[in-house]
């Protein structure tokens, strides 16, 4: 009899760390553009030649940036190969989403424009160091006692049964109705 290896249960993302450039570039982007409060900074405890900046992305968790005044900004897109980060998506309100493209443009950032993903709307842009970011806005509110993931899991089953390519509004509506009926 084969035993299944034990899992390591996680409880959410603790923090994400990016390699930055100089300190001010990171502060201008994370706090100045995205409005993430600058929480604190200290030396990188594994390498004193780097500084470590901490920002709050809005949920009390952290995004951290290693910086060095010796590192020049390089705006070329980050490599997209196996094992590398493609993009990081931030959840935003509908109001924020609808005004984001104009605000990005005013600050000199190009974007994809609004992209319909079926269950959410997306807008993509690159930071000053070439990393791709997404502003994502769900098109639905989960019923009380349920999460966005609950709705998406139910909508996925409905989509598969319907033979549809992706989750769309009718799948979301049916999933929300099913979940609400169980509550």
Image (spheres, grey):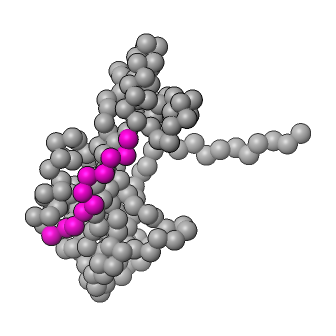
Q: Is residue 136 above or below residue 107?
A: above
**Residue at the image point whose x is 24% and y is 63% from the top:** 111
Residue 20 spot, x, y in % from top left: 32, 73
Magenta extent = 108-118
- Answer whether residue 20 is magenta in the image: no
- Residue 30 x %, y %: 23, 62
Which one is in front, 94 or 49? Answer: 94
Pinpoint residue 121: horizontal percent, then vertical percent: 30, 45
- Magenta stretch, main secondary structure, is loop
In this view, the residue in front, 161 or 85, is 161
The answer to whether 112 appears left or right of 149 in the picture is left
Give the position of the C terminus as an image quadrant: top left
Q: Is residue 70 visible?
A: yes
Q: Quadrant of the N terminus?
A: top right
Residue furthest out toward the right: 1
Q: Residue furthest front?
A: 163
């Amino acid at each position: 009899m084969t035993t299944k290896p034990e899992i390591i249960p996680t409880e959410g993302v603790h923090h994400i760390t990016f390699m930055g450039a100089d300190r001010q570039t990171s502060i201008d982007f994370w706090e100045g553009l995205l409005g993430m409060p600058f929480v604190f900074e200290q030396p990188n405890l594994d390498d004193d030649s780097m500084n470590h900046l901490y920002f709050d992305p809005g949920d009390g968790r952290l995004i951290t940036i290693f910086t060095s005044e010796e590192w020049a900004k390089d705006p070329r897109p980050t490599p997209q190969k196996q094992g590398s980060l493609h993009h990081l998506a931030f959840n935003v309100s509908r109001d924020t989403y609808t005004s984001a493209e104009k605000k990005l443009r005013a600050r000199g950032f190009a974007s994809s424009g609004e992209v319909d993903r079926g269950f959410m709307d997306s807008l993509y842009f690159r930071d000053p160091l070439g990393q791709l970011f997404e502003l994502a806005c769900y098109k639905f509110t989960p019923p009380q006692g349920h999460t966005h993931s609950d709705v998406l899991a139910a909508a996925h089953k409905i989509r598969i049964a319907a033979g549809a390519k992706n989750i769309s509004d009718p799948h979301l509506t049916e999933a929300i109705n099913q979940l609400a009926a169980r509550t």
